[in-house]
Amino acid sequence: MQTKKIIYLFSVMFLWLLGVMSLPCHSAEPMKITVSVPGPRNLSYLPIDLISRIGADRDEGARVVLRHTGGGAVALQHLISYNSDFAVVGLPAVMSQRVNGSDVVALAAVDDLPLFVLMVRSDLREKVKRISDLKGRVLGVNTSSLTSKTTSQQLMELVLRSAGVSPWQVRIIPAGQSWNEQSSMLLSGMVDAVMGDEPFATRLLSDGKVFFLMNLGDPQTARSIPGGGFLHAVLSTRSDLIQSEPRKAEIMIKILQRTLRWVAAHTPEQIAEKLQITDTEEKKFLIAALKKYPRIYSPDGRFSTKQLNETERFFHQTSGTDPKAMSLVLEKMVMDRWAGRKE
């Protein structure tokens, strides 16, 4: 009788175990990572828009959530106020944030070529023929904040000073960093010129709405500007996140590198297709811009020592006589532990 009870109990336990083993296996929730970035579909930051489209985050067991902003300085504001884990912005904007007391660091390169276009409304063609003719006019830049001057504004002020125009002799206002923002500011006449972005600039040029006064994508123009070969978009974060969640930083860099490799291996048409752009005009000009600037993105996220030196030179040139900005050493805020470095 006792033996039958034991056999019965073993049978029940065996059936229970079979039932447990047959239940669906739920894997751990993917790590949520929030990233603030200008855009959407701004050419300089396009790899970030592609992350979830190509599944680069899923492949690393994470879920990236994007927060698009009207400028790098605003994206950095999200970062330092703990509304995002990372920000992808221009490195000079990160340096400006650092000068103003925030312990922010750069983790990996996104771009390999800085793209900014100074575009002027077409109806001003006979009145604005050189940079100095912008004196007294309203100029748009990517949106800055109280604690960080966006890269677009730094470049605008440097170009103006190089032409003998003080930034105080113009009115600088935010023009955002998306097609809707920049095109509406120009077409409505709210600004006379914008230090803007691709592919928006080329689209407006093709429509006859603007003409180019300066294009940093032109190598000759870049050489004429001190530090004109600076590193633009970088992945950045707070030092405290590195201390408390180093694994999150490592995974985010792997996601970025996976995305950059994907971009390097696909055609402009395939990239545009992944973004699922329904506006045929937008899609056409995005593809054209990707073909026009084939080396815009870093292939692997590694920092270039030469480019970092150019960036420091650019930032010091834009800083005027500010002693804190002039004494900033870029190397102290670059963490290449995961991304790596090249000459």
Image (spheres, rainbow, N blue to C red):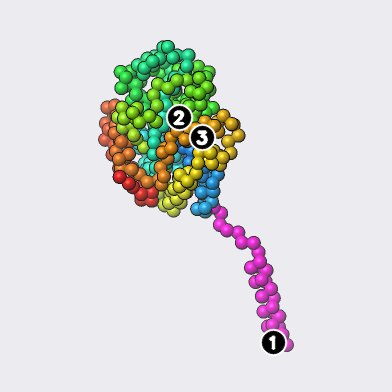
| Residue to which mark 3 is pinned | 287
Residue 178 in view, yes or no: no
Q: Can you tell which quarter of the image residue 156 is in?
A: top left
Identify the secondary structure beneath mark 3.
helix
Residue at screen point 32% across, 39% down: 307
Residue 173 percent location from the top left of the image: 44, 22
Identify the secondary structure beneath mark 1.
helix
Q: Can you tell which quarter of the image residue 22 is in?
A: bottom right
Q: Amino acid at mark 3?
A: Ile
Q: Residues within 10 Å of mark 2 (few under 14, many from 20)?
A: many
Residue at screen point 33% across, 25% down: 158
Which is nearer the N-term, disc 1 or disc 3?
A: 1
| Residue to which mark 1 is pinned | 3
Residue 68 percent location from the top left of the image: 51, 36
Q: Residue reaching furthest top? A: 126
Q: Nearer the viewer, residue 208 or 103?
A: 208
Question: Answer yes or no: do the residues labelled 1 and 3 have beta carbons within 8 Å?
Answer: no
Look at the image and tell me in which quarter the N terminus lies: bottom right
Identify the secondary structure beneath mark 2.
loop
Q: Amino acid at mark 1?
A: Thr
| Residue to which mark 2 is pinned | 197
Q: Nearer the viewer, residue 331 or 148?
A: 331
Q: CA distance from mark 1 to mark 3?
A: 77 Å
Q: CA distance from mark 3 to mark 2?
A: 15 Å
Q: Which residues are magenta?
A: 1-30
Question: Answer yes or no: do the residues labelled 3 and 2 have beta carbons within 8 Å?
Answer: no
- The count of marks equals 3
